[in-house]
Image (tube, rainbow, N blue to C red):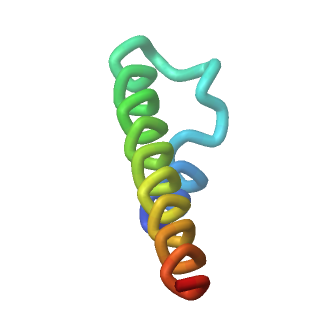
């Protein structure tokens, strides 16, 4: 996920000022960040659950 966040900082500092095509690229990147964040949260939840067994 660090790579995605680095890409966001490098390429999409002002998303509201992007041309239309780049806005869709930015939205796709945000989807990737959200996906990875959710996946990591689920993994941490699984670890906590297993530790309690």
Name the residue furthest top.
20
Above or below for 29 versus 10? above
Total numbered labels placed on residues in the image: 0
The structure residue drawn at horizontal position 54% and vertical position 72%, both measured from the top left corner, is 44
Above-or-below relation of 30 to 41: above
4 relative to 6 in the view: left or right: left
Residue 33 in picture, x, y percent from top left: 47, 49
Q: Quadrant of residue 4?
A: bottom left
Q: Toward the viewer: 44 or 27?
A: 44
Up/down of 8 relative to 20, above or below: below
Nearest the viewer among 48 and 14 is 48
Residue projecting furthest to the front? 53
> Nearest the camera: 1 or 7?
1
Locate residue 29, reporting x and y percent.
41, 41
Quick check: 8 above or below 50? above
Which residue occupies 55% across, 60% down? 41
Q: Residue at x 45, y 16 (%)?
A: 19
Residue 5 pos. (x, y %): 54, 58
Residue 53 relative to residue 22: left or right: right
Q: Position of residue 52 (x, y in %)?
A: 60, 83
């Amino acid at each position: 996920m660090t790579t995605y966040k680095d890409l966001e900082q490098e390429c999409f500092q002002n998303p509201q000022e992007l041309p239309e095509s780049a806005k869709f690229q930015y939205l796709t990147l945000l989807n990737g960040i959200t996906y990875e964040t959710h996946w990591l949260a689920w993994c941490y939840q699984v670890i906590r659950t297993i530790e309690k067994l």
